[in-house]
Image: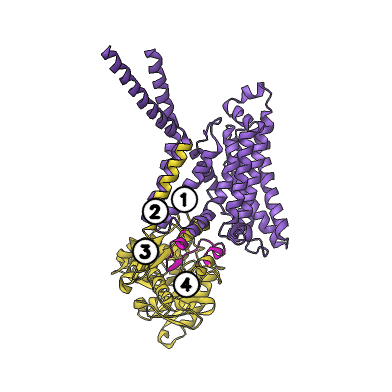
């Protein structure tokens, strides 16, 4: 009898321990949980080593340095989620900014320039989509080509010159604050966009179809999903928002050179992948990407505050990215092994 | 999930409390002066940083900070300037990747009470107080003639091996060479011809050989371009004219070390990045401590570089290019 009792007690204890352990495991294996922990750890570390980090003005102002890349990441979630890739977005920014600069030099006003910027972006995205969907060329090949083409146009015409004359008032979008506050317009604009993308991704059939396509385009097609139309729309959206980013960036720096936004396509993809969106498609959510945006943004800001070299920042981002790619794989195999052991025991 | 959020929130609050205890007052802290360069990993800019450290050591109350983006983009520099504004540094000297794109953010920095100047590669007026340029055409042109005269003992025929015939810089310098050689002390010297090597190594080499064949009594070549001076030095050695034909010009120490050390090229000049970093830091310190306002006509004391005068639109000339010779070339060859 007595031995039985202790045994029962012990097993309950073990169960409780196991429950806690499982909770921790689920928390850490949930990528967003992991990102949130890193984000908070980072905030604590930086707050303690520099007095300039947890400062309302600084935290607000720092968002200027990463909001544009953050906006690029939003439609990129759709592209990557459905198993595609687009490495031409930074080149689209260059082309779009070039078109705006040209328009401005012809005497167009703020409103017209913005429309030009966004439309050129959308057209460039449609150009990508056309070749990828209609001719069935792999997206990496098409966007690799258009990356050179789009920036090349700007390079060929501008050479080492720049458009620097923009109308009065145009600078608000990239440099301005919400009236009467220290909140940058770009930040508010991004949050509204993010809410919109979150809604589409998680609350509409369009979003669910993205997951279906990413998991298996063939299966999705057989279940009646218009795969081609959705993929095409993704590329147009990606171009369109690259155009929007071109408006913001050009407004912020007031100058268009052919090398504008060089390398930003990789930074946008980094944000998406680090946010837990599987690079092969079908997995991921918007919360993870939002966390990764603020994590990377404030990590770079914090490292800048303590005058850490740009090289260290690159290495850190690279390290996080490898972690982002590796950890799910490791966790998966751990889970599988656990499951196997459990099955064997029973 | 709710529990988790509460824990996270609590942790953040704890972090904030620690941070709150860290506020420091700026009383006797050294002035933070930043040298922001085009990109990291460039020997020229590493030497600029050395100059900043030298000036800081001399001034005593200055901390010299060296920063740059990992690739040479305006966006990268803007991000860094935002963090510099956030940590309230006292002054920033910038070698800009884009003379216009940095203006909005440097204006923001100036509005926050930070002194901003540019050097080497300037920011357009309005985005900085002073733009420090290494030298001006007159000083460069006149110095080139003085250098070759010292090498040829003020005697003989001299020719110029330039870049392209349309090169604005070189043409302006050559005009000043003609001006300088009018001085009576050069009465035994003659500037016979200007040839163009188009800044291509092979064409410059052929033009140099051509000069030596055309003028058997040639005593010196001036090549105010880094490609030309290197090609001409090689041509002089290959033609066995070392000692008979002297060469000077504007050259990179790392490329020219061999020829300067073996005497083919007795001396040459170029702006010195160490001096640029040194002078920028000195100027910023003077502006921050309000020794000068940086208005046109102001004279600024710059330690071992003497005085510099602020010109129109804040453009300020550092001085004559630095002269490299057998004694100092090795040090600078390691830098750029």
Marked residue nearer the N-terminal end (2 or 4): 2
Marked residue nearer the N-terminal end (2 or 3): 2
Tag 1 residue: A298
Q: Is residue A266 magenta?
A: no
Gap in angstroms between the C-alphas marked 1 and 2: 19 Å
| SS under mark 2 | helix
The spot of residue B282 in percent (x, y) is 39, 74
Chain of residue at mark 2: B
Chain of residue at mark 4: B
Q: Is residue B102 magenta?
A: yes
In this rendering, do the residues under marks 4 and 1 share a single chain? no
The spot of residue A319 in percent (x, y) is 41, 41
Tag 2 residue: B17
Chain of residue at mark 3: B
Q: Name above or below for residue A197 compared with residue B192.
A: above
The spot of residue A201 in percent (x, y) is 61, 35
Q: Which residues are magenta?
A: B83-106
| Horizontal side, residue A214 vs residue A53: left or right | right
Tag 3 residue: B24
User: Which is more foreground, mark 4 or mark 1?
Assistant: 1
Tag 4 residue: B133
Crowding at dot 1, Cα within 10 Å, few <14 / some 14-19 / many 20+, comes out as many
Q: Name above or below for residue B189 compared with residue A328.
A: below
Q: Name above or below for residue B310 compared with residue A340.
A: below
- Residue B146 bears which disc, if any? none
In this rendering, do the residues under marks 1 and 2 share a single chain? no
| SS under mark 3 | loop
Gap in angstroms between the C-alphas marked 2 and 3: 15 Å
């Amino acid at each position: 009898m007595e031995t039985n009792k202790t045994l029962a007690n012990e097993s309950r204890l073990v169960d409780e321990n196991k429950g806690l352990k499982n909770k921790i495991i689920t928390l850490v294996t949930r990528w967003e949980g992991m990102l949130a922990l890193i984000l908070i750890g980072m905030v604590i570390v930086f707050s303690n080593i520099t007095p300039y980090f947890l400062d309302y003005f600084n935290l607000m102002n720092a968002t200027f340095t990463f909001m544009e890349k953050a906006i690029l990441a939003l439609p990129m979630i759709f592209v990557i989620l459905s198993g595609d890739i687009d490495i031409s977005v930074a080149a689209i920014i260059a082309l779009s900014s070039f078109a705006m600069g040209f328009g401005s030099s012809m005497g167009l006003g703020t409103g017209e320039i913005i429309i030009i910027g966004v439309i050129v972006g959308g057209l460039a995205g449609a150009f990508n989509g056309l070749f990828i969907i209609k001719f069935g060329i792999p997206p990496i090949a098409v966007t690799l080509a258009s990356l050179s083409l789009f920036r090349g146009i700007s390079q060929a015409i501008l050479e080492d010159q720049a458009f620097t004359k923009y109308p009065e008032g145009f600078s608000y979008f990239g440099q301005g604050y919400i009236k009467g506050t220290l909140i940058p317009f770009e930040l508010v604009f991004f949050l509204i966009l993010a809410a919109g993308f979150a809604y589409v991704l998680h609350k509409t059939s369009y979003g669910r179809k993205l997951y279906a396509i990413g998991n298996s385009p063939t299966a999705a097609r057989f279940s009646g999903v218009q795969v081609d139309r959705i993929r095409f729309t993704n590329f147009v959206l990606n171009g369109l928002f690259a155009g929007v980013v071109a408006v913001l960036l050009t407004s912020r720096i007031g100058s268009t050179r052919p090398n504008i936004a060089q390398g930003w396509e990789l930074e946008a993809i980094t944000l998406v992948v680090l946010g837990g969106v599987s690079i092969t498609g079908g997995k991921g959510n918007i919360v993870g990407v939002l966390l990764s945006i603020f994590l990377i943004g404030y990590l770079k800001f914090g490292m800048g505050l303590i005058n850490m070299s740009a090289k260290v920042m690159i290495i850190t981002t690279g390290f996080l990215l490898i972690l982002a790619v590796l950890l799910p794989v490791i966790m998966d195999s751990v889970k599988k092994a656990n499951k196997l052991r459990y099955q064997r025991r029973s | 999930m709710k529990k988790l959020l509460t824990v996270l929130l609590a942790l953040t609050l704890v972090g904030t409390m620690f941070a709150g205890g860290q506020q420091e007052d700026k009383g006797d802290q050294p002035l933070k002066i930043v040298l922001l360069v085009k990109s990291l990993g460039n020997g020229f800019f590493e030497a600029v940083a050395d100059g900043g450290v030298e000036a800081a050591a001399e001034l005593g109350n200055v901390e010299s900070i060296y920063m740059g983006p990992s690739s040479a983009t305006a966006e990268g520099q803007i991000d860094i300037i935002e963090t510099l504004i956030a940590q309230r540094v006292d002054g920033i000297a910038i070698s800009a990747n884009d003379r216009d794109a940095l203006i909005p953010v440097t204006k923001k920095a100036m509005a926050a009470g930070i002194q901003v100047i540019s050097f080497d590669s300037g920011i357009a007026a309005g985005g900085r107080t002073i733009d420090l340029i290494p030298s001006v055409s007159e000083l460069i042109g006149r110095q080139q003639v003085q250098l070759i005269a010292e090498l040829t003992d003020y005697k003989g025929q001299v020719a110029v091996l330039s870049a392209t015939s349309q090169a604005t810089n070189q043409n302006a310098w050559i005009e000043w060479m003609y001006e300088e050689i009018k001085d009576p002390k050069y009465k035994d010297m003659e500037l016979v011809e200007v040839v163009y090597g188009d800044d291509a190594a092979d064409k410059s080499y052929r033009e140099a050989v051509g000069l030596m064949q055309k003028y058997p009594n040639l005593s010196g070549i001036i090549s105010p371009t880094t490609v030309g001076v290197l090609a001409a030095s090689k041509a002089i050695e290959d033609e066995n004219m070392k000692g008979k034909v002297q060469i000077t010009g504007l050259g990179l120490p790392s490329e020219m070390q061999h020829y300067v050390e073996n005497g083919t090229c007795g001396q040459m000049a170029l702006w010195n990045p160490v001096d640029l970093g040194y002078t920028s830091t000195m100027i910023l310190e003077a502006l921050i401590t309000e020794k000068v306002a940086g208005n046109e006509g102001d004279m600024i004391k710059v330690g071992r570089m003497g005085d510099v005068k602020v010109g129109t639109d804040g453009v300020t000339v550092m001085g004559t290019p630095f002269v490299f010779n057998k004694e100092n070339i090795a040090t600078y060859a390691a830098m750029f």
